[in-house]
Image (cartoon, rainbow, N blue to C red):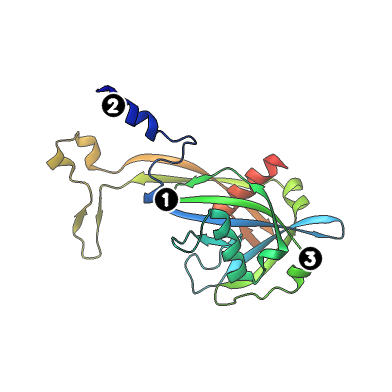
Amino acid sequence: MKKENLKKLISNLPKHPNILGRERFFNSAVLIPLIKIKGEYHLLFQKRAANIRQGGDICFPGGGFEIGVDKSFKDTALRETFEELGIKKKDIKVLGQLDTYVAPIGAIIESFVAKVKKKAYKNMNVDFNEVEKTLLIPLSFFKEHDAQEYTLAQEIQPYKINENGEKEIFFPVEELGLPDAYKKPWGNKRHKVWVYKYEGDVIWGITSVIIKDLLEKY
């Protein structure tokens, strides 16, 4: 390696390492709204409308980072909270950020903990095209009730059988001269899934991972 190439490499190394391949993931952000009611902090959730993607799931307000609209992931979280729940930026105080979560489904989630004014909560303007209902759950509930723990298996699929019964190859193992072991699904990675149940509603998936991270810091 030439000296000038080494200098170029050094100058291009990030001061704060990011996530390699971030651009290949769905980049998103959520707000974790804390609301103080009668001296106790509550978490504000929303149940997604049945007719949208992941309909019926319970989550925090949030969504995908929009290039040209959002300057930061915090902007994403605040914008989505306003669009979904009608809570304005001036009524939200962002306290900090949790660890970045790279989810097995191919999404990266940035989570921001924030205090929301009680008056703003009472005057919410919910977009019912996206949100079926909101839930306010005492933070103490999650401290006092352990989540149920399950496991999901995830495999890497080099091909699939389509609806016509035909084999659709994604990764041409034979053409590439790779070992035969990769001609069939491999990996079988197991992931823990945590589930909380509250008054008939079920909270799981990415949201439960975020809750667990929050509790570990609380």
Q: Given contact means CB atoms under 8 Å apart, are the residues at marks 1 and 2 in contact?
A: no
Crowd around label 1: few <14 · some 14–19 · many ≥20 (10 Å): few
In three-dimensional space, the C-alpha distance between marks 2 and 3, rounded to whole angstroms, equals: 58 Å
Image coordinates of residue 101 in percent, x first then y, are: 52, 45
Q: Helix, strand or loop at disc 3? A: helix
Residue topped by disc 1:
106
Image coordinates of residue 213 in percent, x first then y, are: 63, 43
Residue topped by disc 3:
118
Residue displayed at 18% across by 35% down:
178
Image coordinates of residue 64 in percent, x first then y, are: 48, 60
Query: Is 80 or 169 nearer to us in this picture?
Result: 80
Query: Is 61 or 135 nearer to us in this picture?
Result: 61
Residue topped by disc 2:
4
Q: Earlier in the sequence, mark 1 or mark 2?
A: 2
In the image, what residue type sits under mark 2? Glu
Query: Is 180 or 116 nearer to us in this picture?
Result: 116
Instruction: Say above or below: 5 vs 84.
Output: above
Image coordinates of residue 124 in percent, x first then y, are: 70, 73
Q: Earlier in the sequence, mark 3 or mark 1?
A: 1
Q: Helix, strand or loop at disc 2? A: helix
In three-dimensional space, the C-alpha distance between marks 3 and 1, rounded to whole angstroms, equals: 35 Å
In three-dimensional space, the C-alpha distance between marks 1 and 2, rounded to whole angstroms, equals: 37 Å
In the image, what residue type sits under mark 1? Gly
Q: Earlier in the sequence, mark 2 or mark 3?
A: 2
